[in-house]
Image: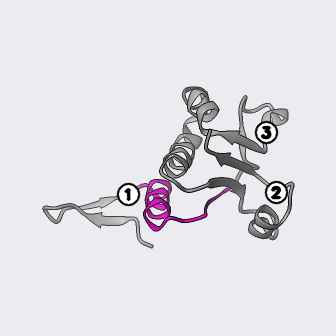
Amino acid sequence: MSTLAPDADGVVHNINADTAAAAVAEALGAEKLLMLTDIDGLYTRWPDRDSLVSEIDTGTLAQLLPTLESGMVPKVEACLRAVIGGVPSAHIIDGRVTHCVLVELFTDAGTGTKVVRG
């Protein structure tokens, strides 16, 4: 999927890939949204490695949003949009980890951070 899109006047815009993925997941009624990145998941107090969360609800995440590092903001906003828009869960996972998608989807522990409605 390309993140380049024209507006009504034909002007081409570069759409944030996280924003586009969330909108597509919401529009398709997806069961999950997977956001692959180069970190372990969501840290509530970066760079404190002990602050990695495995699951967080949308209410808590929305409150946490203003305190996050700028690089995580588009991913978190996309996860919030998707889950609030009806996608049951969104996952922020480390794409550098071997079999990260399989581990996230098919194990109880997962590998990143799962965002759920709440």
> Mark 1 sits on what residue?
15
Mark sitting earlier along the chain (2/3): 3
Mark sitting earlier along the chain (2/1): 1
> Which residues lie in the magenta part?
16-37
Quadrant housing the N terminus:
bottom left
Is 45 situated left or right of 33 in this image? right
Is 98 situated left or right of 58 in this image? right
- Give coordinates of residue 35: x percent, y percent: 62, 58
Is 14 situated left or right of 51 in this image? left
- Give coordinates of residue 39: x percent, y percent: 72, 50
Assess whether residue 8 is covered by the magenta stretch: no
Amino acid at dot 1:
Ile
Which label lies toward us, 2 or 3? Answer: 2
Which mark is on residue 110?
2
For the rendered model, the colour scheme is one colour
Front in this rendered view, residue 118 or 91: 118
Which mark is on residue 26?
none
Which label lies toward us, 2 or 1? Answer: 2
Vertical order, 17 against 116 (above or below): below
> Mark 3 sits on what residue?
52
Name the residue at 13% across, 62% down: 9
Quarter residue 63 falls in: top right
User: Alpha-carbon distance for marks 1 and 3?
Assistant: 28 Å
Amino acid at dot 2:
Gly
